[in-house]
Amino acid sequence: MQVKGSLVVQNGTLITANRLIPNGVVLIERGLITDFGEAGEVEVPADLPVVDAKGAYIAPGFVDIHCHGGGGVWSWEHPNAFAFAHLKHGTTAILPTFTYNESREQVRDGLQTILEAMDSREPFANAIVGIHMEGPYINKKYGAITSPIRPVDPVEYQEILRVAGDRIKVWTLAPELEGQEAFVNEAAKYQISLSVGHSEATAEEIFRFVPQGLRIGCHCTNASGTTPSPSRYGGTREVGVDEAVLVHDDIYAEVIPDSEGVHVRPLMLKLIHKTKGTDRVIIITDAMPEAGVDNGNGSDLNWNHLGHLAGSRLTMDKAVRNMMRHAEVDFVDAFRMASLNPAKVIHMDDRMGSIERGKLANLILIDGEINIQQVILQGQLVS
């Protein structure tokens, strides 16, 4: 009898967290990876359906922890449509991400919509694994649209934590704002990974929150600054948020690798990767609703009505392809940065992020150019 979520994927090269395995096989039972390895090393039940990879790479699905929209919709307005738009491009785990310029009412309603989607039996709801709050407690100096950015409000954040709790996996903030210490202490109760972004905090202000869970540098080299600004000494550079992130071993660096190297210049991508090492870099899309929608010119950049760079139109397959090209990294390193590291920083690497026994069977089949050929979500083929 065929069991839902059970199959075998074979005849491809496995991309594991440490190496490539040629002529690989992945055994999936009830949505979980139960075994993997080279053909002949894995005992495959005769009654399981077979997916022939036809020489493709078999890789863990992408985990995108910073994504605002896709498929023409905002993540908090139509979560399932948003998730499916990115699932088609290989993202099997995603955090709908609020923008910092949402009103209290929009945040409240959006949270409810996302939580209902996560609890539903709708197709592809399993790809939504949590929430990322980007703001609203950030530095107005570093917001493309500043009107709804507001001071740290205990009444507001306590209500958000009451409603969403540990479903919030990441919360981006500016550590220098008054009231952040009390907020950080509350967020720590839910094991939320804090992210420094849209900020000009000093290194000391950033580092003091590491014990309470500050683990991420939000979209490095974008929308953060230095203190003091301008520099105290003409012709010199002050230490800023990016430098603090690069120095601290416990902080991951998010990067947005667009095709043109605008968000992060290719040389800067190499510097971040060289400084942090593969295990402390996370590839994100920072995608807007236009992601996954044909815009006629093929650009993966996104500009707002003021002509300012505002997120991207990336999907994770494109982001990984760009990272490999700009930073000259290989498949194994690219998938650590796009799958395993983001799973680690949100405390979900025991369930996803790599091809390992006991983890969810979230897999993608790709060619050598990271073109998606097949997506498998918890052992089920996505069509």
Image (cartoon, rainbow, N blue to C red):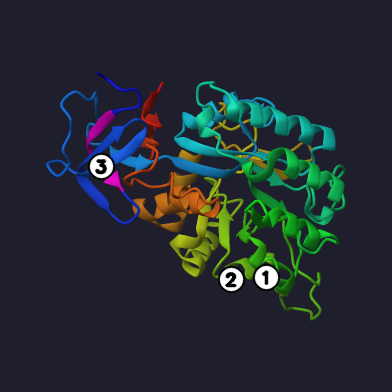
Q: In the rendered image, which quarter is residue 252 located in?
A: bottom right
Residue hosting label 1:
207
Is 331 displayed left or right of 79 in the figure?
left
Residue extending farthest to the top is: 1
Q: Decide whether residue 276 is among the magenta residues.
A: no
Distance from the alpha carbon under mark 1 to that under mark 2:
8 Å
Q: Where does residue 75 sit, x and y in percent of width and height?
A: 65, 32
Give x and y (percent) for residue 78: 65, 25
Q: Give the magenta part as a residue range.
A: 7-15
- The residue at the point 45 percent across, 47 percent down is 339
> In the rendered structure, are the residues bearing label 1 and label 2 in contact, judged by CB atoms less than 8 Å apart?
yes
The three-letter amino acid code for the residue at tag 1 is: Phe
* Residue nearest the viewer, comparing 134 with 235: 134
Q: Which mark is residue 158?
A: none
Say which label, 1 or 2, has the lower sequence index: 1
Give yes or no for contact between labels 3 and 1 (Cβ–Cβ under 8 Å): no
Q: Is residue 214 above or below residue 50?
A: below
Residue depicted at x 73% and y 44%: 161
Q: Is residue 183 visible?
A: yes
Distance of label 3 from label 1 (alpha carbons): 41 Å
Identified by mark 3, the residue type is Asp
Neighbour tally class for label 3: few under 14, some 14-19, many 20 plus, Cα within 10 Å: some
Point out residue 140 in the picture as x, y percentages from the top left corner. 83, 53
* Disc 3 target residue: 35
Q: Residue visible at 80% across and 60% down?
A: 182
The C terminus is located in which quarter?
A: top left
| Three-letter code for the amino acid on which mark 2 is drawn | His
